[in-house]
Structure formats: structure tokens, C-alpha cells
Image (cartoon, grey):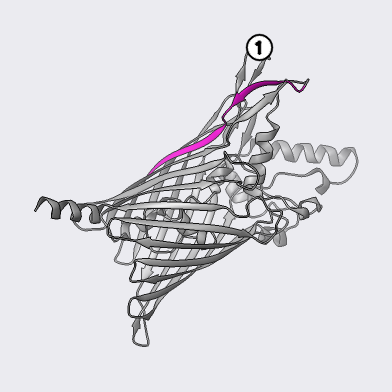
Amino acid sequence: MKTLSKIVILCLMAIVGIEASAQKNEFNPVETGVTSLGIAPDARGASMGDLGAATDPDANSQFWNPSKYAFAYSSAAVSLSYTPWLRKLVNDIFLANLSGYWKLGSQDNQALSASLRYFSLGEVTTSDLGGVAAQSLNPYEMSFDVGYSRKLSEKFSMGVVFRYIYSDLGFSDSYAGDQTTGASAFSADISGYYTTFPIIGRNECQWSWGWNISNVGSKVSFNNGENPAFLPTNLRLGTTFMFPLADYHTLALSLDLNKLLVPTKPRRQDYPEGTEGDQQWLDATEDWKNMSSISGIFKSFSDAPGGFKEELREITFSLGAEYAYNNQFFVRAGYYYENEFKGNRKYFGLGAGFSLNVVRLDASYMLATAQTSPLDQTLRFTLTFDMDGLRDILGRRRR
């Protein structure tokens, strides 16, 4: 028998960020499969504390709120992001993300978008019962999606995304009789975005609201269906208020709230002691295992053992700010909070960006509030190409 314990540990640490409070009895995070889908892919959103439901649209809106593409200023853009993950522990885990959009028609009210994510867990060496190295493998998770967004009025748009997901964390070894195969799943997102321009004093400001329900779909089934897991279905709500400080200077303040729409897995300690409690726990676990994804969404609002108080603990929030000079130079900062009993991820984000006519470069840096957090010192880099700027440059050269 061979083991992939390193993979399991790294996946858990990468998303949950286990700290000392994990030893408390109340520690009860929501369990999902393909947890890498929840990692912010781009430096701009990450530098503001992992938010983007209502910020101005950019090439990476596919992750945060794809309905924003209908309000994009450029006719097309493409971005490439790279994130070394858990760099304090290992040096070969990373997330790469390619995304972009293209505005359709002459009325500037609809757009097509797509993204490709690849999360590599580096090289893992398996061993047999005697501890002898037996096989090297490169586990990974990936997804590909396409989306469509459209303005339904001058101030409101909606969008949909369809996604294919593949997770390969194991291997197949016919000699050992261990048949571990990858798992596939399909999901969809639906989102909305509203923006208005109120006049406050003598200044025209911008106030936007956004929401996105992401990864609604089938379960992901590992080991040929023996271990089905819920996708990280998520509800994101956010608002952004942007106002001018002076000529060419603006400041945007944003807030995002998130809740996983996944039922909490039953724990033995939440049931009475004795045989009757054992049976209740086994029945509840079987119901959780057989529950459909759609039923799980509704169940997620009322299934926490601690009642309404624990349901509130499942809500995370991000608070961030972005300063822009002439829409060319950007400075950003933010904070992300997750309850200590639901994962205990708490960190600050810092970042900056510089934009030219064709290209924009963004970078972010994460500072965890606990020195023991494996997420501390996480870096992200995003390179974005604006197709309108590129077309203008090519047109000048031809003339």
C-alpha cells in the first residue's frame, strides 16, 4: 500500500491555514473538494484582501464577478497570473491563471470571457510500507471555463459561466492493487453587477454592487465514486465606493462577504455518547455523503451544530482600498478575516500596479497575522495586455 499523505496535508494547509486554535473542540471548517478553486488568482484582488465582487472590471473578473465584463472599458484584454504557493514550506507548488474577455457587437453591452487555472502540487514521492521510495508523481488540479455577460440596463448587468474541473491527486498502480484515478466535475456561475454615479458635493463618484454564486454543479468523485466531495460552491456579495481626491487622483473602498454554500460534515462529538449516538452520527454522515449539491446549498444555511451563531462564523469578509493616479499608477491594501473555528485565515494584503497603453503589471504580498501561518509572505504577479492599446500601436506603425 502506498500513501499520498503529503498531498492531503499540503492541500489542507494551503487552503485552511491550520494554526494553534485548530486544536480546540469548536474548530469545524466546511470540507470541500478541489479547494484550489477558492484561491484568488490575480494580484489586484489579492492585494485588497481577496476581494473583487464590485471593483472596476478588469481581465480577471471571471473569478470575482464575470458580469462586470459587460461594463469593461476596453474591447478586449488578456491577463496571466502566477502565484508561488506555500513558499515558506516548499518551492514547487504554484497557481497559474490565464483569463481574458472580448466585447461583442457595436453597442458595447455584451462580452465573452474565458479562463484557465492550473494548480500544481509539485513533485511527490510515494513509499511502500517499509518506507522505501517507490514512485514520483506530479498531482495537480485544473479548470477551464467560458462565460457570457450582458447589460440589462444602463446600470445593471448579469453573467453566466460554465466550467469543467479536473483534479488528479493520485496515481494508478496495478501491481499494488491501488487504483486511484483523477476526478472530473462540471459547474456553473451566475452573477450580477450594478453601478451608478452619484453626485456628492461637486464631485461625481461611483458606487457599485456585485454578487456571484460560483461553482454550482456536480460533486467531484474520487476513487471511482467511493469518496464524493462537494465543490466549493460560494456566495460572494460586495460593494465598492470610488470618489475623486483631486484631479487625476481617486480612491476606492471595497467590502466583500463570502459564504460557502456547502453543508457541514457531521462530527461524532456533536452527538450523544453511547450506541444510540454512534448510530445517529453514522446516519447523519451517510445522509451528508448522499446529499445532492443543490440540496446541500439550502442545507448550508441551517446545518451548523452550533446553530445560528456558528452559521455566522462561516461568513468571511474582505476590506480593501485602491488608490489610483491618472489610472496609471496604483497602490492597494486590504485585510481578510475568517473565524478561528472555520479555518482561522487572517492576513493583510499589500500591492501596487503600473499601467501603460498596452500592458499593466500588478504585484501583491500577503502578511499573515500569525507567524506560523503557511500563507505568510505569499506573492502574486499579474501581467495584463490591453488589446485596444495594442491595436492603436499597430495602427500607428502601419501609417
Total numbered badges shown on the rendered structure: 1
292 shown above or below 197 = above
Q: Quadrant of the N terminus?
A: top right
Residue 202, quarter of the rendered image: bottom left
User: Going by the image, does 374 lie left or right of 119?
Assistant: right
Q: Residues within 10 Å of mark 1 (few under 14, many from 20)?
A: few
Depth order, front residue of 299/250? 250
Depth order, front residue of 291/192? 192
> What amino acid is found at the position of numbered circle 1 in the picture?
Tyr
Identify the residue at horizontal 54%, vertical 49% (top origin).
39
User: Going by the image, does 42 lie left or right of 129?
Assistant: left
Identify the residue at horizontal 59%, vertical 26% (top origin).
137
- Residue 56 place in picture, x, y as percent: 38, 64
- Residue 370 place in picture, x, y as percent: 70, 59
277 shown above or below 159 = above
- Residue 244 place in picture, x, y as percent: 38, 78
Q: Is residue 187 visible?
A: yes
Depth order, front residue of 372/307? 372
219 shown above or below 225 = below
- Residue 229 place in picture, x, y as percent: 62, 37
Q: Give the secondary structure at mark 1.
A: loop
User: Going by the image, does 285 lie left or right of 44?
Assistant: right
Residue 230, quarter of the rendered image: top right
**Magenta stretch bounds:** 131-146
Q: Is residue 224 visible?
A: no
User: Going by the image, does 227 lie left or right of 50?
Assistant: right
In this figure, which residue is indicated by the disc labeled 1?
175
Please tell me whether the stretch drawn in magenta is mainly helix, strand or loop: strand
55 shown above or below 235 = below
